[in-house]
Image (cartoon, rainbow, N blue to C red):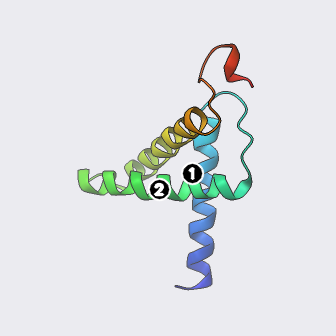
Amino acid sequence: MTLGEILSILVGGLVVGALGRLSVPGRDPMPLWLTVLIGIVGSIAGGMVAISLGWGVGGIFVLSVLAATFIVIAFRLFVFKRPLTGPGARG
């Protein structure tokens, strides 16, 4: 694996992870490395589903962001122990 491939994976993970975090309202105090990790995991999960369904590149991107969004939601619910809506969501 070359340095260019590694950088493209990290930048792609950052973009997908950032879009996943932006799609969930409220504040999520996560470090940058966790955003990249969520984006990479979301890209892998969404990419596998999109490829198995026979979707193209656009489908892979959309499902990657959707998977990253679900990971951010799960992270907020199970790690931060905060609800998605209501007064406790801002905490």
Is residue 66 in view from this perspective? yes
Tell me if label 2 and label 1 are in contact, CB under 8 Å.
Answer: yes
Residue drawn at x 63%, y 57% is 36
Residue drawn at x 30%, y 57% is 51
- Pick whichever of labels 2 and 1 is earlier in the sequence: 1
User: Which residue is at the far left?
Assistant: 53
Residue 72 appears at what percent x and percent y?
57, 40
| Residue with the mark numbered 1 | 16
| Left or right side of 76 for 56 | left
| Left or right side of 48 for 14 | right
Kind of residue sitting beneath label 1: Val
The quarter of the picture where the C terminus appears is top right
Q: Is residue 74 above or below residue 59?
A: above
Give the alpha-carbon distance from disc 2 to disc 1, as whole Å: 7 Å
Residue drawn at x 56%, y 32% is 77
| Residue with the mark numbered 2 | 43
